[in-house]
Amino acid sequence: MKIFPYLIRLSLLLLFSAISSSVCIGVDYAQGEQAFVSGKSTIDFFEDVDEKSFYQQKRIYGMKNELNNYSEKLHNLKERFDRIFYGLSSDGRFSTPFDTSSQPQRPIQEPIAPSSLSFPPVSTSPGPVSENNLSPDELNIDEEVNATPPQNQLAFNVESPGEFTQNDMIVSTFDPELSSKGGYYLILSPGIAFPYEKHNSSKSFRKYDPGFSVSLTSGLKSGGFKIGLGGIYKRHTFHHSAQLHSSSLRLAGDSETFAGFLDLGYTFTLSSKLEANIGAGIGYYLSIIDDNGDRSSRKDHDIYLTLSTGLAWRFSEYFSTQMNYRYFHEDEVPAHLIELGLNFDL
């Protein structure tokens, strides 16, 4: 009877050892299962090669749509750049570089016999949704696409406006012939006037320093010819040697001339951007001259004549700059003018 308590203790010890071993085996199995699941990517759970191929095709299809969107944005950006900086027109031609009219189709699988193999379920822990944790069924989403056949595999159209070609060579960012077609012109020309005549009378000796001028002409143009109206203002001050003979007083006044004229001209195209021009004008002028000792002024008026020639550098069909020589005829201060012109074609 004394051995009975020892048997009970031995049984309890064996039972406790069995329970501890079961718990350890369960923990090891759970850790191994978690390591197996976390060590495999989503694509490793596809059953065959066709499923993996379909998954990759869907990803490539989505990237093509994104590249088409970026291509269209680049095209619109270039079109806006041409309009703002070059004043160019556009016909809006554009085609996407990738054809996305047909979506990848899921492969048709033959029914297979049930297998005794099983895979542990994918962890559904909360987190951001991405393509890597979507099943193949969730990837089969219908998308609306534009069924446009591919015509140009470039983001920019090579033959787009702003790239004028001649003999298969790009010679200008615009068509030079557009500048010689019909339309309107407006030319603003500030300049420096160099007088070339002196006046020595019984009353005074009049000599003038170089002065400044500004002219504005506007009118119609067609085929290189121009006809319009113009106005010009010119001012000179007396040279330090100018004086009155009666009192030897130095003349400290000036001479101002206003003229309006009919503007005629013709433009020659020398190259895609360089032009030459000649012009003539006839009109009427009024000069106001302060050459009296008492500061009173006198007026002089007559027929006004002018001739001009120069070169122009064309930036676009709407704008160019020009350097001109102009002969300015009047009785008091005839002069040679060097003008820098800003030419706007409308």
Image (cartoon, rainbow, N blue to C red):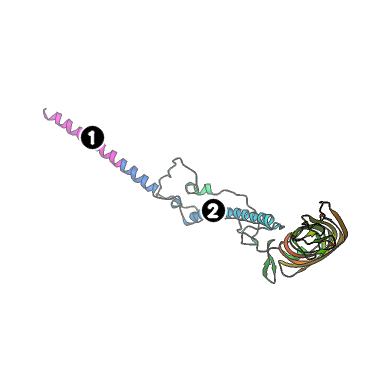
* Mark 1 touches mark 2? (CB < 8 Å): no
Q: Residues within 10 Å of mark 1 (few under 14, many from 20)?
A: few
> Which quarter shows the C terminus?
bottom right
Please give left or right for residue 76 compared with residue 37 in the image: right
Q: Position of residue 33 (x, y in %)?
A: 36, 45
- In the structure shown, which secondary structural element does the residue marked by tag 1 occupy? helix
Could you tell me the amino acid type at mark 2?
Lys
Please give left or right for residue 26 compared with residue 64 in the image: left
Nearest the eye: 256 or 67: 256
**Where are the magenta residues, as a range?**
1-26
Q: CA distance from mark 1 to mark 2?
A: 56 Å
- Residue behind mark 1: 16
- Residue behind mark 2: 58
Q: Position of residue 171 (x, y in %)?
A: 68, 68
Which numbered dot is residue 330?
A: none
Q: Position of residue 247 (x, y in %)?
A: 80, 57
Whether the magenta-drawn stretch holds residue 179 is answered as no
Answer whether residue 266 is visible to the viewer in this image.
no
Residue sticking out furthest to the top: 1
Could you tell me the amino acid type at mark 1?
Phe
Residue sticking out furthest to the left: 2
